Image (spheres, helix red, strand yellow):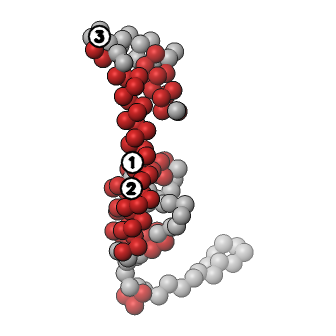
C-alpha cells in the first residue's frame, strides 16, 4: 500500500514529475506508472522475502561457511542489505541470527592460526 501511495505521489503529487513539467506527452505511458510500478515493486519485495525465508535459510543449514552465507544474504536480498547498510548495520545482518564470525576481522581463520588476543586493562586514567 505504501509503495502505491508513494508512486502515485511521485507522479502527480505536489512535488512530482508533473509539477516540474515532465508530464509525458505520449498517451500510452499514462496508466503504467500508476499500476505496474507499485505491483512489480510489491512482488519484488515479496520475492526477496521468500528467497530469504526458504532458499537462504536452507543453504545456511547445509553450507557452514559464514562468508558464503553472508554473500548469499547480500546477493539474493539486495533491498534488505541496502536497508541494513543505511541503518549502520552489516549488510548481512538479520534479526533471526547474527553471523558473528563475519563480524570479526578473522572470521574464517581457524583458532589455531589466529594470534592470541590479550585484553588490554584500562585503568581509571585511560592509560593501559
Circles 3 and 1 in contact, beta carbons < 8 Å? no
Spot occupied by residue 49 in the image (x, y as percentages of width and height):
44, 52
Q: Label 1 vs label 2: CA separation?
A: 6 Å
Assign a secondary structure to mark 1. Answer: helix
Q: Nearer the viewer, residue 109 or 55?
A: 55
Viewer can see residue 62: yes
Q: Residue at x 32, y 12 (%)?
A: 24
Q: Residue at x 40, y 17 (%)?
A: 17
Outermost residue on the bottom side: it is: 112
Instruction: Report which quarter residue 55 is drawn in.
Output: bottom left
The quarter in which the C terminus is drawn is: bottom right
Circles 1 and 2 in contact, beta carbons < 8 Å? yes
User: Where residue 69 is drawn, which disc sits there?
Assistant: none
Spot occupied by residue 5 in the image (x, y as percentages of width and height):
51, 26
Q: Residue at x 47, y 48 (%)?
A: 83
Give the crowd class for mark 2: few <14, some 14-19, many >=20 residues within 10 Å.
Answer: some
Q: Nearer the viewer, residue 106 or 83?
A: 83
Residue holding disc 2:
51
Residue holding disc 3:
27
Spot occupied by residue 10 in the image (x, y as percentages of width and height):
45, 22
Look at the picture and state if 123 lies above or below 98: below
Is residue 117 rendered to the left or right of residue 120? Answer: left
User: Where residue 47 is drawn, which disc sits there?
Assistant: 1
Look at the picture and state if 94 lies above or below 29: below
Marker count (numbered): 3
Assign a secondary structure to mark 3. Answer: helix
The answer to which of marks 3 and 1 sits earlier in the sequence is 3
Q: Nearer the viewer, residue 107 or 11?
A: 11
Is residue 88 rendered to the left or right of residue 122? Answer: left
Instruction: Report which quarter residue 119 is drawn in.
Output: bottom right
Q: Label 3 vs label 1: CA separation?
A: 32 Å
Amino acid at each position: 500500500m505504501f509503495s502505491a501511495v508513494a508512486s502515485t505521489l511521485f507522479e502527480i503529487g505536489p512535488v512530482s514529475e508533473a509539477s516540474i513539467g515532465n508530464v509525458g506527452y505520449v498517451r500510452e505511458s499514462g496508466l503504467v506508472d500508476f499500476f505496474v510500478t507499485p505491483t512489480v515493486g510489491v512482488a519484488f519485495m515479496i520475492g526477496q522475502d521468500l528467497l530469504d525465508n526458504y532458499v537462504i535459510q536452507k543453504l545456511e543449514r547445509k553450507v557452514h561457511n559464514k562468508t558464503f552465507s553472508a554473500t548469499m544474504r547480500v546477493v539474493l536480498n539486495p533491498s534488505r542489505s541496502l536497508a541494513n547498510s543505511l541503518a549502520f548495520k552489516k549488510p548481512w545482518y538479520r534479526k533471526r541470527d547474527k553471523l558473528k564470525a563475519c563480524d570479526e576481522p578473522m572470521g574464517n581463520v581457524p583458532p589455531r592460526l589466529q594470534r592470541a588476543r590479550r585484553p588490554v586493562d584500562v585503568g581509571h586514567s585511560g592509560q593501559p
